[in-house]
Amino acid sequence: MKVLITGGAGFIGSHLAEACLKKGDEVYIIDDFSTGSPDNIRFFQEDERFRDRFFVTEDTILNQDTLLELTGICDVVFHLAAAVGVRYILENPLDAIRINIQGTEKVLEMCSKFKKKVLIASSSEVYGKHLHAPLIETDNIIYGPSSKFRWSYAASKLMDEFTALAYYRTKGLKVIIARLFNTIGPRQTGAYGMVVPRLAEQALKNEDLTVYGDGTQTRTFTDVSDVVRALIALTESEAAVGEVFNVGGTQEITISELAEKIIKATGSSSSVKLIPYNEAYEKDFEDMQRRVPGIEKIRQTVGFEPETDLDSILRRVIDFMAEKMDCVRIEK
Ligand SMILES: NC(=O)c1ccc[n+]([C@@H]2O[C@H](COP(=O)([O-])OP(=O)(O)OC[C@H]3O[C@@H](n4cnc5c(N)ncnc54)[C@H](O)[C@@H]3O)[C@@H](O)[C@H]2O)c1
């Protein structure tokens, strides 16, 4: 099988590339390295088991000619490239619209041209400001006004879902939509505000762990290996075509509890420091108070079950961050 992964040098994309290479696929990635890193994929380029089956194109998905060539070669496309994360979007507001909407349209157009199955990585952000849990795929969607740019990421991912479903309905394109909930693991960077690597780094440096808001907001965290397994299973299922699936774990935890767990796991002398949202992000910032996926649909369709518990995932992330920080110290 030949697979194309857009955003393949990113956190999830590089783990997906690794899983596909390990099962014998030929893997093509396109990435502009805006938030991804050459370090995430260097291993596959050097390892003799993989290097003859791993092809990297450094380019933007907005380049139609490159996409045309790569989509033509491959059998299935995992579309992960995106402007990711609330902080990144607040700092680069046009990117959410250009990359996430125009970029996804281009990917879908090329997949439609060559009739290639495509999985679109959407986000739990699309649900908006719900207070209930679990969130299920047919729930309504509730956003704040367009003056609050934090919702533009959610809205852009929602537009991606509409566009993909429109290609499915009008052109018969085989699309699958995966709404990913907080995914964590090695190679994720805290540089764009992702909570676990950010808190882990602070704990390892014995600095205060900065928790935004009052810390009572809850999330679930899923190991990237579980998420990758779900994405591959979805592309292998005919029943998944034309459908939207939540992908995530169900162990709900407040961000304050998460911070305490990280302090304990690192043996750090740090404390938790609450930072009001308007200082962390912008005035009148609105957050999602709870974000827990209902996973009955994906369980029924492909038998997906998250396997890695939170303590084990945190251990993996902390070990990765510690190693990375050691490398930086040695280079200095
Ligand atoms: N990590 C999570 O918890 C999470 C949650 C929900 C949804 N998602 C979705 O999963 C996907 C992957 O996210 P991630 O966490 O791995 O983030 P990431 O930032 O590590 O990966 C995104 C990749 O896309 C690349 N990219 C960005 N713009 C591009 C462009 N114009 N052309 C080519 N490449 C481009 C980046 O360089 C990066 O390598 C994204 O679509 C994201 O919205 C992630």
Image: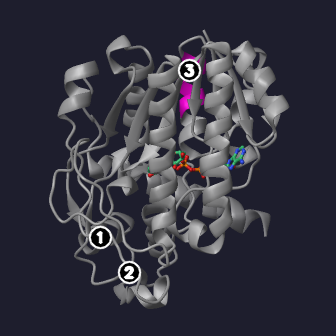
Of residues 264 and 181, which is closer to you in this image?
181
Disc 2 crowd rating (10 Å Cα; few below 14, some 14-19, many 20+) is many
Residue 156 position, x and y percent, is 52, 54
**Residue identified by numbered label 2:** 212
Quadrant in which the N terminus is drawn: top right
Q: Is 91 situated left or right of 318 in this image?
A: right
User: Which residue is found at the position 31% from the left and 68% from the top?
Assistant: 288
Task: Describe the element under mark 1 as helix, strand or loop.
Answer: helix
Disc 1 crowd rating (10 Å Cα; few below 14, some 14-19, many 20+) is many
Q: Which residues are magenta?
A: 16-22
The type of residue carrying mark 3 is Cys
Q: For the residues marked 2 and 1, what is the alpha-carbon distance in whole angstroms?
A: 9 Å
The type of residue carrying mark 2 is Tyr
**Residue identified by numbered label 1:** 255
User: Which residue is found at the position 76% from the left and 43% from the top?
Assistant: 62
Residue 170 position, x and y percent, is 49, 23
**Residue identified by numbered label 3:** 20
Query: Relative to residue 248, is residue 202 depicted above or below?
Result: below
Q: Are marks 2 and 1 in contact (CB under 8 Å)?
A: yes
User: Which residue is found at the position 69% from the left and 37% from the top?
Assistant: 41
Check the image and tell me how it is coloured.
one colour
The type of residue carrying mark 1 is Ile
Q: For the residues marked 3 and 2, what is the alpha-carbon distance in whole angstroms?
A: 36 Å
Q: Which of the 4 quarters of the picture holds residue 78?
A: top right
